[in-house]
Image (spheres, rainbow, N blue to C red):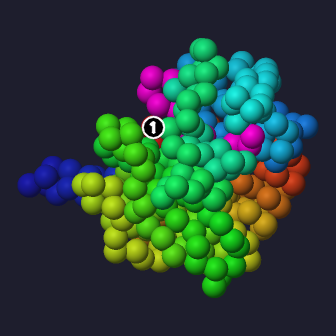
């Protein structure tokens, strides 16, 4: 009996110790510092990591898409009449194909990286070009959601979200009347679509139907003082938010609680992406310093 009581006490004590340390462990350690990956850019956005160790990104006002491999920066694709004018958000499929929001003309495009061939998936909706396609994410059924903002203002509700169906090769309008929808990501926990509604300084989420339509819009968190821009989830369901204007990356729990605030080197962090061999490196595009940075985290990103 004495041994049983001792065993129970020991297990209880061990559980308390483990709980204490697990709660105390930060997602980003305080001694971690941002490291420069590439600089001298012109409004970088849309970092996208592929499975072969390459980081692609949009150099929005520079007229080209770049790539970084083994620490070396190269121009991947230059803007032209036959390719694109300006790209913003990028995302890469498991096959290595790059999908991009082309906001110069207003298109959704696909880029074959080996051939550097650009394919227009959709030029618009109801006979008109998209406004300014901004960011995109794969749906759980491997189709694409992308945001299409227009005017900026709390009362200017002309932003939209579209869904591109690869099988049907067509787009559907799945949400509208939004105040500058921007970055987006799908939670690994509740499978909802989270969207930065930048002009209202908040992040909202939607339920996703089987056909891709969005419903039950709710405010997840409000972050005043700047614009929530790029979003990225880790494997625990924590949401990383690039807060444009305040120089902050917020880490928010699945319940909407701010867990950490990470100061960025400039006031205009725009987009985020997990990469590295273990997917624990957070890449950040920053538009005041026109630089791409990286930071080690303790959690993996979702791919």
Residue 95 is drawn in which quadrant?
top left
Residue 21 image offset from top left, x and y in percent: 48, 54
User: Of all residues shown, which one is farthest toward the bottom?
Assistant: 155
Q: Is residue 91 in the magenta section?
A: yes
> Within 10 angstroms of label 1, few (less than 14), some, or many (20 or more) residues?
some
Residue 227 image offset from top left, x and y in percent: 69, 69
Asked if 31 appears above or below 202 in the picture, the reply is above
Asked if 245 appears above or below 300 in the picture, the reply is below
> Which quadrant does the N terminus fall into?
bottom left
User: Of all residues shown, which one is farthest toward the front?
Assistant: 127
Residue shown at 47% from the left, 31% from the top: 93
10 or 243, which is in the foreground?
243
Asked if 120 appears above or below 28 in the picture, the reply is above
User: Of all residues shown, which one is farthest toward the right?
Assistant: 40
Q: Is residue 131 in the magenta section?
A: no
Residue 292 is drawn in which quadrant?
top right
Residue 45 image offset from top left, x and y in percent: 72, 46
Residue 247 image offset from top left, x and y in percent: 78, 62
279 or 12, which is in the foreground?
279
Q: Mark 1 points at which residue?
A: 303
Residue shown at 70% from the left, 20% from the top: 69
For residue 239, side relative to residue 211 (left or right): right
274 or 204, which is in the foreground?
204
What span is in magenta? 85-96
Residue 179 showing in the rendered view: yes
């Amino acid at each position: 009996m004495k041994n049983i009581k001792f065993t129970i006490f020991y297990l209880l004590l061990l559980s308390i110790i483990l709980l204490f340390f697990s709660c105390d462990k930060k997602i980003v350690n305080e001694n971690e510092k941002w490291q420069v990956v590439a600089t001298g850019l012109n409004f970088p956005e849309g970092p996208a990591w592929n499975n072969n160790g390459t980081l692609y990104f949009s150099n929005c006002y520079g007229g080209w898409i770049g790539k970084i491999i083994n620490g070396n920066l190269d121009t991947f694709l230059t803007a032209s009449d036959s390719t694109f004018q300006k790209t913003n958000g990028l995302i890469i499929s498991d096959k290595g194909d790059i999908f991009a929001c082309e906001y110069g003309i207003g298109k959704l495009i696909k880029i074959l990286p080996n051939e550097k061939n650009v394919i227009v998936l959709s030029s618009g909706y109801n006979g008109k070009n998209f406004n300014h396609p901004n960011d995109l994410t794969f749906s759980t059924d491997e189709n694409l959601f992308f945001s299409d903002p227009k005017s900026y203002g709390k009362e200017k509700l002309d932003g939209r979200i579209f869904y591109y169906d690869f099988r049907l090769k067509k787009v559907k309008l799945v949400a509208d009347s939004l105040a500058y929808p921007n970055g987006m990501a799908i939670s690994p926990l509740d499978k909802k679509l989270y969207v930065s509604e930048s002009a209202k300084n908040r992040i909202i989420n939607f339920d996703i139907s089987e056909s891709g339509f969005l419903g039950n819009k709710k405010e997840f968190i409000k972050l005043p003082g700047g614009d929530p821009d790029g979003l990225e989830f880790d494997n625990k369901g924590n949401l990383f938010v690039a807060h444009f204007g305040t120089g902050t990356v917020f880490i928010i729990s699945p319940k909407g609680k701010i867990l950490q605030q990470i100061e960025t080197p400039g006031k205009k962090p725009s987009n985020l992406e997990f990469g590295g061999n273990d997917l624990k490196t957070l890449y950040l595009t920053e538009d005041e310093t026109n630089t791409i940075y990286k930071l080690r985290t303790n959690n993996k990103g979702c791919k």
